[in-house]
Amino acid sequence: MAPGGDFASLSAALRSGADSVYIGVGDLNMRSHATMNFQFEELSEAVKLCHAVGKKLYLTMNTIIFNGELDKMRRLADHAKKVGVDAVIASDFAVISYARSIGLSVHGSVQMNLSNLEAVRFAAQFIDVAVLARELPLEDIASICRSIREENICGPSGDLLKIEIFIHGALCVAQSGRCFMSQIACN
């Protein structure tokens, strides 16, 4: 899986062998102010590009959603469902709940901070793929994966919960996307 901030990087990811690409649209994603983002009306074309070569497209909707953003979130999720996005990557339960209600598959974002088996069991009620917390040691990742198989922990699709992990660290002073810069700067 590779990020695609615009059509050039999306195309480059596909040419380079990515099986799937994740993108953000507008400002409901964690990279909205740090990189290029797709516009609402470009989502359909991005999906077509990926699907034309047999690849998946995931839409990141992984920010905290405030009351004033609920309508925008619903419009984007409805549009994602309509144009064939393969899943949304989310952490806010408003997004997770709404996406599930319209039949849109959900992958749990790293911002969910799934760092133990109990959290994974709970999240499996709502998500088909869990992105584990970045800080987990390999032994914990292996143990969680083993337990998923042994206990037959399935997501809403009925399939075993799938696990994704980051293979690189955070580029900021953070744990699983939760920035601690202000805490460090104030101490």
Image (cartoon, helix red, strand yellow):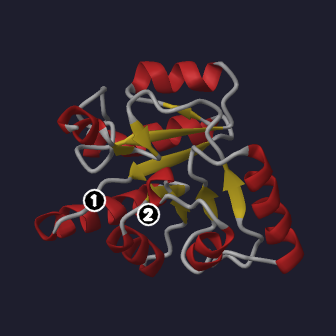
Question: Are dots 1 and 2 in contact, CB under 8 Å?
Answer: no
x, y (%) of residue 120?
A: 63, 70
The answer for how far apart the CA atoms under marks 1 and 2 are is 21 Å
Q: Judge whether 132 appears above or below 4 on screen.
A: below
Q: Which residue is more in the foreground, 160 or 43?
A: 160
| Quadrant of the frame with the C terminus | top left
- Crowding around mark 1 (Cα neighbors within 10 Å: few <14, some 14 to 19, many 20+) is some
Could you tell which of marks 1 and 2 lies nearer the N-terminus? 1
- In terms of image quadrants, where is residue 2? top right
- At label 2, which amino acid type do we have? Lys
Q: Residue at x 18, y 37 (%)?
A: 186
| Classed neighbour count for the residue bearing mark 2: other residues with Cα under 10 Å, few (<14), some (14–19), many (≥20) | some
Residue at the outermost left position = 68
Residue 40 horizontal/vertical position (percent): 27, 46
Question: In the displayed structure, would residue 139 be above or below residue 126?
Answer: above
Instruction: Residue 133 in the image: state x and y as whole percent.
Output: 56, 51
Quadrant of residue 117 in the image? bottom right
Labels 1, 2: front one: 1
Quarter that holds the N terminus: top right
- Give the residue at x 38% y 33%: 173
Q: Mark 1 falls on what kind of element?
A: loop
The answer to whether 184 appears left or right of 160 in the picture is: left
List the residue tagged with mark 2: 81
- Residue beneath the point at 66% across and 75% down: 155
- Among the 4 quarters of the image, the one containing residue 182: top left
The residue at which mark 1 appears reads as 64
Question: Could you tell me the amino acid type at mark 1?
Answer: Ile
- Looking at the rendered structure, the secondary structure element under dot 2 is helix
Q: Nearer the viewer, residue 6 or 46?
A: 6
Q: Is residue 152 left or right of residue 133?
A: right
